[in-house]
Amino acid sequence: MNTVVSLPTLDELRRYVHAALCERDSLDPAQSPLRESLILSGGQPCGLLLEVRGPRLTRNSAIWAGQENRILFYDTSGARVGEVRLCEAPDPAGLLRSRDAA
């Protein structure tokens, strides 16, 4: 999974990560909702921790490192299983705006 993709909006990034995390263990996206947590550095948003949970304690996750323009994928054991570089990505500062609007 060493790919370069364009994900200019947060919604596109979320959809891409959700599909990739579910595909890894053949999880049904409708039955495995995407959970996310904001990552802060110095009080400023810098990325997201995204994860899906499935049966048998399956928990796949991804970290969007906004300032590095990449997404790191991890399996249930915590081993890194892939990386995607972003040629176009959302602005991490927009994470607070989208969170405040929700």
Image: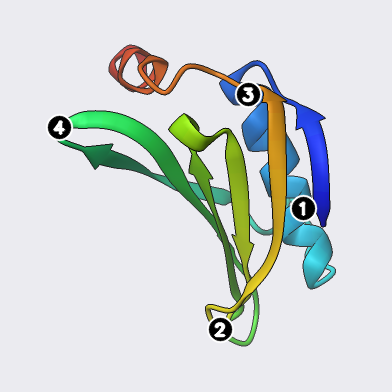
| Residue located 79% across and 73% down the image | 25
Q: How is the image coloured?
A: rainbow
Percent x, y for residue 54? Answer: 64, 72
* Picture disc at residue 20: 1
Q: How busy is the neighbourhood of tag 3: few (under 14 within 10 Å), some, or many (20 plus)?
A: few
The vertical placement of 47 against 10, above or below, is below
In depth, the one of 69 and 35 nearer the eye is 69
In the current view of this chain or complex, which residue is farthest to the left?
Answer: 43
Q: Amino acid at mark 4?
A: Gly
Q: Secondary structure at mark 3?
A: helix
Which of the two discs, 3 and 4, sits closer to the camera?
A: 4
Which of the two discs, 1 and 4, sits closer to the camera?
A: 4
Residue picked out by circle 4? 43
Q: Secondary structure at mark 2?
A: loop
Location of residue 59 (image quadrant): bottom right
Q: CA distance from mark 4 to mark 2?
A: 32 Å
Q: Secondary structure at mark 4?
A: loop
Q: How busy is the neighbourhood of tag 4: few (under 14 within 10 Å), some, or many (20 plus)?
A: few
Q: CA distance from mark 3 to mark 1?
A: 14 Å
Residue picked out by circle 3? 11
Q: Quadrant of the C terminus?
A: top left
| Residue located 80% across and 67% down the image | 24
Q: Amino acid at mark 2?
A: Leu
Percent x, y for residue 6? Answer: 77, 24
Residue picked out by circle 2? 57
Percent x, y for residue 20? Answer: 77, 53
In the current view of this chain or complex, which residue is farthest to the front?
Answer: 68
Q: CA distance from mark 1 to mark 4?
A: 29 Å
Q: Earlier in the sequence, mark 3 or mark 2?
A: 3
Q: CA distance from mark 3 to mark 2?
A: 26 Å
Answer whether labels 3 and 2 touch (C-beta < 8 Å).
Answer: no
